[in-house]
Image (cartoon, rainbow, N blue to C red):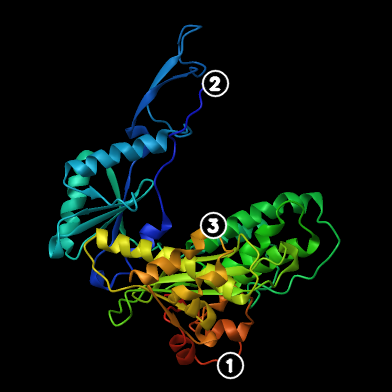
């Protein structure tokens, strides 16, 4: 099969699908059991003609081969074919696939509603009533042999994976660090060959951690990822510093609270305008989106173009935040939850004025057309933009914060005390909607 180019070998999975549904207050009392199909890859039927050399001692005559009928672990398309097979099974028992995210299936309405979230071969069955959950699991189990892993407890924490990363890449005698990022001094000493080989491996693993469950690492890892080609000693040491930070806070995780008093859909956007000469003075944007006060998606990245002013940089960041909240609104509507108009918060009054007033758009006519997306949606009433004080913005996605600032933004360690800086637990908890605790 070396001459065959397989194109359909993706398997639908998205962290946002797993995190956004449990964040809903309407499912506060929902039991979230997790099931896993045993040997899922071997349950799928392959469409391609694939042949396999027989192993030694199988007794097959020379020149003969096996034809692979079912999927096998290691084949590119096995995961994709399994997903199609499982999709057909859910549709047979009455589930409909959500259009905006193919990882979620729904059935019924109100108290009888059931939601199935799939992540490769892991399955979350979610419903307001325990009886509904058990019924759906029984229906799935009649078609596939499932392994019930009891209550789902590891959707917003990665302490086990962090232990593996630390054991592989950090000396056990290294002391924990208090903040994930310190200033990276400009150096000239190129990292050793071994360090250059290890550096992208570390950054890749940190990217997985930051994008999945550690929003406060987004900026740090984004900066480290800029130097993958020829990292210096300073960059390697900065990556080691992040590992030291994880060593002291590996039990920290996101805590989702069922709070109906919170706005249903909110996003915060912020930028650090033209602060880094190493990336041609391109600004760093940061955004985070909440569902009823629970963060479900976050981002820290370098903007694609050079902004001529802080207003332009904030305008581009607000556009990215708008895209996220509109997607989340579409997702909630697809499962029967109607929400009010999403809100995007910015600490730049110039950005807000330009976004709301069509007569001001000529000032930004040189910006790419796609960034005027936020203006159109504000004018049509699909989203609103409001001012928030700079002290209340999520600067951790666009700026490096000190330990005392991390504590004020809700960072708490595994013994339920804030990081050093003299901030009381109550103050840290009240300063922002989400708290990072070891619960």
- The label on residue 198 is none
Q: Nearer the viewer, residue 109 or 150?
A: 109
Q: Dot 1, crowdedness within 10 Å: few (<14), some or many (≥20)?
A: few
Q: Quadrant of residue 383?
A: bottom left
Q: Residue 435, image x and y in percent?
A: 45, 79
- The numbered mark, 3 or 1, whose residue comes first in the sequence reads 3
Q: Residue furthest top?
A: 62
Image location of residue 220, percent across then percent down: 63, 67
Residue position marked by numbered label 1 in the rendering: 422
Depicted 382 relative to depicted 101: above or below: below
Where disc 1 sits, the SS reads loop
How far across and down, in percent of the image, does residue 96 sit? 22, 48
Marks 3 & 1, CB-CB < 8 Å contact:
no
In the rendered image of this protein, does residue 317 appear above or below residue 10?
below
Q: CA distance from mark 3 to mark 2?
A: 32 Å
Q: Nearer the viewer, mark 1 or mark 2?
A: 2
**Callout 2 crowding tier (Cα within 10 Å): few <14, some 14–19, many ≥20:** few
| Disc nearer the start of the sequence (3/2) | 2
Instruction: Please give the name of the residue rendered at 47% of the width and 75% of the height, measured from the top-left corner.
Output: 359
Residue lying farthest to the right in this orientation: 188
Which label sits on residue 3? 2
- CA gap, disc 3 to disc 1? 32 Å
| Residue 396 seen in the current view | yes
Write down the residue under mark 3.
Answer: 208
Secondary element type, mark 2: loop
- Quadrant of residue 28 in the image? bottom left
Q: CA distance from mark 1 to mark 2?
A: 64 Å
- Residue 316, position in %: x, y? 54, 67
The reply to whether the C-beta atoms of the residues labelled 3 and 2 are less than 8 Å apart is no
């Amino acid at each position: 099969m070396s001459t065959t180019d397989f194109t359909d070998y993706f398997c639908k999975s998205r962290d946002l699908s797993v995190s956004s549904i449990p964040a809903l207050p309407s499912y506060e009392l929902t039991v979230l059991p997790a099931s896993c199909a045993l040997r899922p890859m071997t349950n799928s039927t392959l469409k391609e003609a694939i042949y396999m050399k027989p192993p030694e001692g199988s007794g097959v005559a020379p020149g003969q081969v096996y034809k692979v009928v079912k999927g096998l672990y290691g084949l590119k398309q096995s995961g994709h074919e399994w997903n199609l097979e499982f999709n057909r099974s859910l549709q047979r028992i009455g589930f409909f696939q959500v259009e905006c995210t193919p990882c979620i299936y729904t059935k019924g309405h109100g108290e009888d509603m059931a939601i199935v979230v799939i992540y490769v071969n892991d399955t979350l069955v979610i419903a307001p009533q325990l009886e509904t959950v058990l019924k759906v699991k029984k229906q799935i189990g009649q078609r596939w042999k499932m392994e019930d892993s009891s209550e789902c407890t590891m959707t917003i924490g990665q302490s086990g994976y962090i232990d593996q990363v630390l054991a592989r890449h950090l000396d056990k005698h290294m002391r924990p660090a208090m903040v994930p990022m310190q200033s990276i001094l400009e150096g000239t000493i190129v990292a050793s060959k071994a360090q250059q080989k290890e550096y992208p491996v570390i950054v890749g693993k940190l990217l997985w951690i930051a994008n999945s469950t550690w929003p406060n690492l987004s900026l740090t890892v984004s900066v480290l990822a800029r130097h993958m080609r020829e990292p210096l000693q300073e960059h390697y040491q900065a990556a080691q510093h992040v590992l030291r930070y994880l060593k002291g806070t590996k039990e920290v995780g996101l805590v989702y609270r069922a709070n109906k008093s919170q706005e249903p859909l909110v996003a915060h956007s912020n930028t650090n305008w033209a602060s880094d000469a190493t990336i041609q003075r391109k600004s760093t944007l940061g955004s985070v989106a909440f569902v009823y006060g629970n963060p479900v998606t976050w981002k820290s990245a370098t903007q694609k173009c050079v902004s001529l002013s802080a207003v332009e940089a904030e305008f581009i960041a607000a556009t990215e935040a708008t895209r996220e909240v509109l997607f989340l609104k579409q997702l909630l509507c697809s499962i029967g939850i109607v929400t009010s108009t999403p809100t995007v918060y910015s600490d730049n009054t110039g950005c807000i004025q330009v976004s709301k007033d069509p007569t001001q758009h000529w000032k930004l006519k040189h910006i790419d057309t796609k960034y005027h997306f936020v203006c159109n949606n504000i004018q049509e009433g699909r989203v609103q933009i409001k001012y928030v004080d700079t002290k209340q913005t999520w600067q951790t996605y666009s700026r490096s914060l000190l330990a005392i600032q991390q504590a004020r933004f809700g960072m708490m360690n595994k013994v339920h005390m804030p990081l050093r800086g003299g901030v009381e637990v109550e103050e840290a908890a009240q300063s922002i909607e989400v708290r990072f605790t070891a619960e």
